[in-house]
Amino acid sequence: MNVTIALALILFVLMIIIGGARGLGAFVSLWINFLVLAVVITLISFSFNPFWVLLIGGGIILTITVISTGIDEDATSLALSVSFIVMLILLALIVPIEHLALSGGFSVENSEELEGLSLGISVPFTTLGICAALLATLGAIAEAAVAIAAGLSELKADQTTIDLPTLAKAGQNLGQEIVGTAVNTVLFGYLADFLSLSLLFTRLNYSFAEIINTKLFTASMLSLLYSVLGVVLVLPFTILLFYYQNRKHVH
């Protein structure tokens, strides 16, 4: 038994003990998302249109992630709608930024590992960079959308006599706290990944100018900024859709 299987079994047991049926659903959804990701990679490698594959695959991953949380129907609908909107906005931003940044592909630091391998693949590296950048944001988007939508649903259930503008304001305050926590989660995850990269730059005696112009640093920093931007965008769109949906019910 290797380490990966052992950790997966430990995770499975803990999620069952702590989360019960929801924990089991989250564990199953994790492996389904892995399968969807493998299919997305395979289709892109077979020269299918990467943007259509990315949109469909990303939508499936978001749907599975949100539904597996087990929140109520209204909150699920709200979280899914917001997640799709934010994903499309990020895609519209990522495409031109990745073309301008030219951070796709392998860097000079990867040359040793690539020696003897062919780089003549059928997909442009910039396109692969766009796909990787968007896929890296989906988890943070879904997590923030579910947390804020569930919080708004609870506020609505508990405060039945409160008017809609006040309820939306309370939801905004709650959402700001959730967004702050989600941003910190993304940031510390990035810092953990950047640790080995910073050691490499230190050993190679890179100057500050050289560091910020390397593909490795640029790609990592852009990925962080995309994720943070996605989390931040979730809050206003969730509040707006929540207000719009409930205003329709009131009238």
Image (cartoon, grey):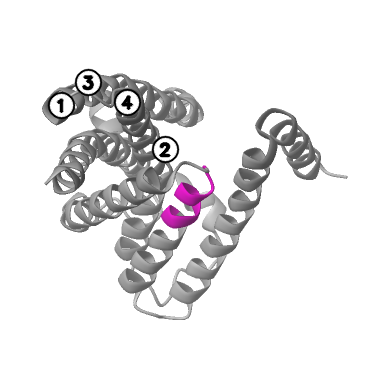
Determine whether, in the image, residue 101 is placed left or right of residue 51. Answer: left
Name the front one of labels 4 and 1: 1
Q: Residues within 10 Å of mark 4 (few under 14, many from 20)?
A: some
Residue under pointer 4: 155
Badge 4 element: helix
CB under 8 Å between discs 4 and 3: yes
Badge 1 element: loop
Q: Earlier in the sequence, mark 4 or mark 3?
A: 4
Closer to the camera in the image, 163 or 34: 163
Name the front one of labels 1 and 3: 1
Residue under pointer 3: 170
Badge 3 element: helix
CB under 8 Å between discs 1 and 2: no
Residue 143: which disc? 2
Q: Residue at x 16, y 53 (%)?
A: 100
Q: Residue at x 46, y 29 (%)?
A: 189
Q: Earlier in the sequence, mark 1 or mark 2?
A: 2
- Main SS, magenta region, reads helix
What kind of residue is marked 4? Answer: Leu
Q: CA distance from mark 3 to mark 2?
A: 20 Å
Residue 163: which disc? 1
Q: CA distance from mark 1 to mark 3?
A: 11 Å
CB under 8 Å between discs 1 and 3: no
Report the magenta residues as a range.
62-69
Instruction: From this view, report whether residue 121 is shown above or below residue 79.
Output: below
